[in-house]
Amino acid sequence: MPQVSRLSLVNRSTDPTMLLLLLGLMTGTCLSSIIPEKEKNPQYWRDQAQHTLQHALKLQKLNTNVAKNVILFLGDGMGVSTVTAARILKGQLHHMPGEDFQLEMDKFPFVALSKTYNTNAQVPDSAGTATAYLCGVKGNEGTLGVSAAVIRSQCNTTKGNEVTSILRWAKDAGKSVGIVTTTRVNHATPSAAYAHSADRDWYSDNEMPTEALSQGCKDIAYQLIHNIPDIDVIMGGGRKYMFPKNMTDVEYGDEEKARGTRLDGQVLVNVWKDKKAQDKNAHYVWNRMQLLELNLDRVDFLLGLFEPMDMTYELNRNNQTDPSLTEMVEVAIKILRKNPKGFFLLVEGGRIDHGHHEGKAKQALHEAVEMDRAIGQAGALTSLEDTLTVVTADHSHVFTFGGYTPRGNSIFGLAPMLSDTDKKPFTSILYGNGPGYKVVAGERENVSTVDYAHDNYQAQSAVPLRHETHGGEDVAVFAKGPMAHLLHGVHEQNYIPHVMAYAACIGANKDHCKLPSSARLGPQPALFSGLLTIFLLLSLLF
């Protein structure tokens, strides 16, 4: 570790650990007091490791039950560095140092890595990746629910190249299905569950070129209502794409950005209602109070559209009008679990990605923490015995944190040194590129002159871009429940839905479902060894 420079600046952070560090640097005080007393004893670490070992040994007994329920949590843009930083943040929100805290997803027993590239992109986008982890087939960047034979924005390449998703497989098997997102319900991630589109940006017919419309392609909002008409639960944003062009919004009135966009004049919310059987209770809600007042025992179908576009960041959320992701997940599971055949639920923490694109790490990480809360709530409402839960990301971001920060340093705080090049302080969190690139008087901006703890502070970046980009490294896959052990090692991203389908006995690969539970483990070396021994003995006798 390099020599730490003494900081002769007023730190705008109110983090007590950072202030203690600065005081220590200025006075020469030993900083060992930051270390928890128990961690100074080697036996603490030995006991911790033995406890973890005993827990790992129990995993040798595999859960080979059929997964009645499958829940997929997708943190959009939630790379490994985001997971680690969110862990520290959540711990610090619980008044702990943070590094040794456990996220809900950290508690999952099986972890793998997923290779995220698209068929035509080394660093992927959210549409091609969604096709992989929902449909089991890799596709091109910018395309949804179609194979790599489809060229982005070319409608006439779509027909015959559609691929179906695990949501469709579950519905065909008689299960209930749901989609919950903090983005638009017709954004990239949820769209791959039900739509087949040559372009992820075709939210409504208003965003489609005339050529595509004349060739018969349908917009994504239209496909949400028509392709799989009996999706039991749909919640998120995207309200304006369901209403005619310039129709005023129920919440924001005549605000231009909230007005309806549809050129075909359809009110898709009404179409959604009309498609439901007369003996079914279908409810449309647009705010949190309406959602929480529902008697869920009397809800068969639910459409909740809480914002004209994406839902607001968790840090900015209006508690009266917008539900949290955790609240939406709880409502969804309580509706879906009424089906004795089980359910499939897709949950997207979609605005993690948006926070990173805007260089607003604080917004991104609080979104990740909220998704982790939702994961915990889902676990409380389901059972490990019959529910496979998978948590993963579609891709990463060029987000990092470093700078030799001390234990317990605010995740949004400063590194404990000045740059040895420009002699200015820097935050631990930085981006490889993005809107945080700032030059003042020909030099890098001095972060001590700005409020780097602000919710919307844009962390400094190495390369100026209006929008920060995705990262191309592998992302983590966390799994628990029936057949979770099949997610292990390093996998292609399109492997994920095949595992979920195998565990739930849905889709094309169902031959194993006729076998007893023990036989679903696959070929066992000990069994073959025993059979071989018997065969050799019999050959000697005869």
Image (spheres, rainbow, N blue to C red):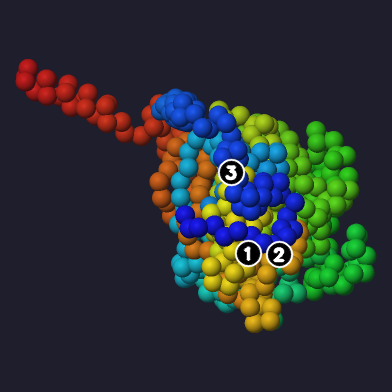
Kindly identify which residue carries mark 1: 425
Q: Quadrant of residue 182?
A: bottom right
Kindly identify which residue carries mark 3: 31
Q: Could you tell me if residue 242 is visible in this image?
A: no
Instruction: Point out residue 145 in the picture as x, y percentages from the top left corner.
Output: 57, 61
Q: Are marks 1 and 2 in contact (CB under 8 Å)?
A: yes
Instruction: Point out residue 38 in the picture as x, y percentages from the top left corner.
Output: 55, 29
Q: CA distance from mark 1 to mark 3?
A: 20 Å
The residue type indicated by label 1 comes to Pro
Q: Which dot, 3 or 2, sits closer to the camera?
A: 3
Judging from the image, what secondary structure is the residue with disc 1 in?
strand
Image point 68% across, 32% down: which residue?
A: 381
Q: Is residue 69 left or right of residue 474?
A: right
> Which label's residue is closer to the chain start, 1 or 2?
1
Judging from the image, what secondary structure is the residue with disc 2 in?
helix
> Which label's residue is closer to the chain start, 1 or 3?
3
Name the mark on residue 448. 2
Q: Is residue 153 left or right of residue 249?
A: left
> Eyeballing the image, is 142 above or below 539?
below
Image point 54% across, 71% down: which residue?
A: 421
Direction top: furthest residue = 541
Instruction: Point out residue 68 in the picture as x, y percentages from the top left corner.
Output: 58, 34
Image point 27% across, 27% down: which residue?
A: 526
